[in-house]
Image (spheres, grey):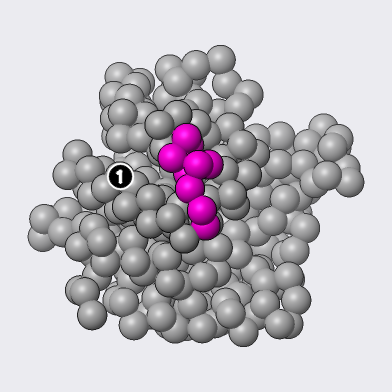
Amino acid sequence: MLGQTVGQLISERTVLAEKTLSFEFFPPRDDSAELGLWKTFDAVLDADADFVSVTYGAGGSNPERSLAVVDRMARDIPTIGHLTCVGSTRAGSLEVVKRFEAAGVKSILALRGDAPRDNPNALAEGEIKSALELIELISDFTDLEIGVAAFPEIHPESPSLEHDAKVLRLKQDAGAKYAITQLFFSVESYLHLLSASAEAGADLPIIPGLMPISNAQQVIRMANMSGASIPAHLLQRLESANEAESRVIGMDFSIRLGAKLLEAGAPGLHIFTLNQSKAALELARGVGLVARS
């Protein structure tokens, strides 16, 4: 499995009428957080995940820790290295690509990313202005498989879902082989994305990215930051419940959403762990992608 790309894994599972299971991690901010990261990673390996991904940070704010995590994970499981291009030079981006290759990475998730808070003008200052330009750069200089982001609830800077779908088609034409969605909370949003993408001629597999709602306030905060809409009925229940009750409500919703997405034809689930294994694996077990223990 280590020699396979994400696209190959998805194709293999599709032939077998199976779904992929994967998890996202972020580089630890300090040495103490690193212990929790590797404990979670070990739990994911025990759950027979198909692949993992590692975020890069706004504006490449934590590249060395990210690269170190990718280097270690790629020894044990197919690993996607996220690569953002905000404020980046072409030479600098290619250097990171070379380091991914040296670590044994077979796939890169090419993203524009957001400007860091301390430098909101970073996008205008960089040589690479968009994820599409980054995809073209990677395609010109490497054979690494390329994945991209997809937006079920419309990119914050986009005028419409149809525009997002056309951009996704351009990314596919430039070399993207799969997409992983940003945070979202409804099956309808995912199905609308699939429909718009098909209309635009984009037929690459789109993997739903899901965040288990185990800490309601944290997820609400992240949803607000990303522009994702939490259904009003769910938000009302979460806000009126105590901490323990809100976890039960949130996880029940997350599991039902994941199951419905798989039933609707999603090729698998990519679970955002926040470097914590309990809720991530509870979601994976709840939808039937991991045997219950």
- Name the residue: 89% across, 46% down: 118
Q: Quadrant of the C terminus?
A: bottom left
Viewed as shown, does residue 109 lie left or right of 12?
Answer: right
Q: Quadrant of the N terminus?
A: bottom left
Magenta segment's dominant SS is helix
The answer to whether residue 164 shows anywhere in this view is: yes
Q: Is residue 126 above or below residue 285?
A: above
The one of 167 and 38 positioned closer to us in this rendering: 38
Tag 1: residue type?
A: Leu
**Disc 1 on helix, strand or loop?**
helix
Crowding around mark 1 (Cα neighbors within 10 Å: few <14, some 14 to 19, many 20+) is: some
Q: Report how many numbered discs are placed on residues in the image.
A: 1
> Can you give x and y, in whole percent of width and height, for residue 119 in the image?
88, 43
- Name the residue: 39% across, 76% down: 44
> Can you give x and y, in whole percent of width and height, for residue 67 in the image?
65, 71
> Can you give x and y, in whole percent of width and height, for residue 284 in the image?
31, 63
Check residue 237 for magenta coloring: yes
Q: Is residue 81 above or below residue 224?
A: below
Residue that label 1 marks = 257
Viewed as shown, does residue 180 lie left or right of 112?
Answer: left
- Name the residue: 72% across, 50% down: 58
Q: Which residues are magenta?
A: 235-243
Check residue 48 for magenta coloring: no
Q: Is residue 106 above or below residue 34?
A: above
The one of 5 and 213 positioned closer to us in this rendering: 213
The one of 131 and 188 positioned closer to us in this rendering: 188
> Can you give x and y, in whole percent of width and height, for residue 269 in the image?
33, 54
Q: Is residue 69 above or below residue 189?
A: below
